[in-house]
Image: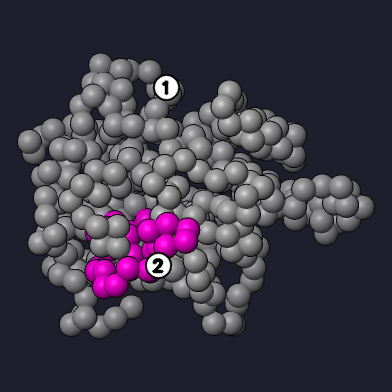
Amino acid sequence: MRTKSRRLSVDKLFVLGAGASFSATRPNARYTSEFPPYKQTPLDRHFTRVLSKLVSKQSIWVNESVKVINKSWRDHIDFSSLGLEEAILTQAANMEFTSAIRPRRRRNSIKFDEYMNHLVHIAAFYLRRARQGTEGIYDKFVEEYFENDRTSNRIITFNYDDVLDKVLAENFSLKDIYFSELKPSQNGEVEPEGSDFPILLKLHGSVNWNCSSDDFSKIITQDWDGQDPYFIENIWFRKTGCPKPNDGVSPCIIPPIEAKPITSISLFRFLWARACEYLHECRKLYVCGYSLPPTDALAASLFKEFNNRSLETVTVIDPDPLVMTKWRMLLSRKNVSNVQWTYFADFAEFVNSVQ
């Protein structure tokens, strides 16, 4: 992380979790079902169920990948009964155990990185269908806080979907939204310049970023401990659709594996470092639909480590009011100012309150 003089002075910093997209893509204000319909992004607890039952008439590869995910599942507890993060950690542990203790069984078994490659492909396929609901919550959000490139507001997100990204793209260039080394297409060239302070820090990657499947495999499996950070030379933007598993191209996202490569992959090291800087410098912090899940220890460390004596307010937005208690306990420490706390139960409710 850089010295204070080289950081951006952030006014409002929004931390967006799955609850924000879940709210913004809700079909309409009257929709009350807890389970997401077509075109609404899922919460973690929904994700395994929607993926395990995903069917496509046009993209046959989707059905084949779903079969691989279901058939290769290694646990007595049903895949669709677990949240996505818990399911991936369970599968990783079970496959590692089998590989070490029962090596004969692994000969005809799929490897973990192959399993994850199928999983992220169908996840990207599912999420790229997501759309804003009729309330236009992300439209209102961007209009209020990100109207032009003079804004000092920023976003940290743990979401893979690109629903918000599409709205931001109406006001900002891709290299200013994401990072300057993102290519506009697979065969395109990196465009000059670009902001050193991205508007949207996607800490787990994005469904509209692509990389080679070889690079994705290294993200999942390679141990770069003690080595220089690995540089993924070619990451490009895909405006629509998603690749097939046998194309040699994968969505450039980090699924919830136990050891996320924030220090071993240079891109994600940059994104997490900027996130830490933004937390150090922001004046107002908004935590929207992110509940500090226990499976995400690295994110917890991110929020434990920052110092900010200029922080004035923290707004927590989550259906569970106990989440605010969790955040208050985390941020009630000597290197963070005494702040004013505000609570909203829903991201749409929050956005509509400032219109």
Seen at 86% across and 47% down, the residue is 108
Identified at 43% across, 23% down, the residue is 38
Q: Amino acid at mark 1?
A: Pro
Q: Check disc 2 and report the residue beneath it.
A: 189
Look at the numbered disc 1 and give the secondary structure of its residue: loop
On the question of residue 271 being in view, the answer is no
Q: Residue at x 44, y 37 (%)?
A: 127
Q: Is residue 64 above or below residue 27?
A: below
Q: Which residues are magenta?
A: 177-206
Q: Residue at x 8, y 38 (%)?
A: 354
Q: Is residue 262 magenta?
A: no
- Spot the residue most to the right: 104
Q: Quadrant of residue 3?
A: bottom left
Looking at this view, is 61 or 96 the one in front?
A: 61
In the picture of the structure, the residue carrying the numbered disc 1 is 37
In terms of secondary structure, where does tag 2 sit?
Answer: loop
Left or right, 321 with respect to 75, comes to left
Q: Which numbered mark, 1 or 2, is in the foreground of this view?
A: 2
C-alpha span from label 1 to label 2: 38 Å
Kind of residue indicated by mark 2: Glu
Q: Main secondary structure of the magenta part?
A: loop
Task: Report if residue 166 is visible in the image.
Answer: yes
Mark 2 is surrounded, within 10 Å at the Cα level, by few (under 14), some (14 to 19) or many (20 or more) other residues, namely few
* Residue 99 locus on image (x, y percent): 82, 56
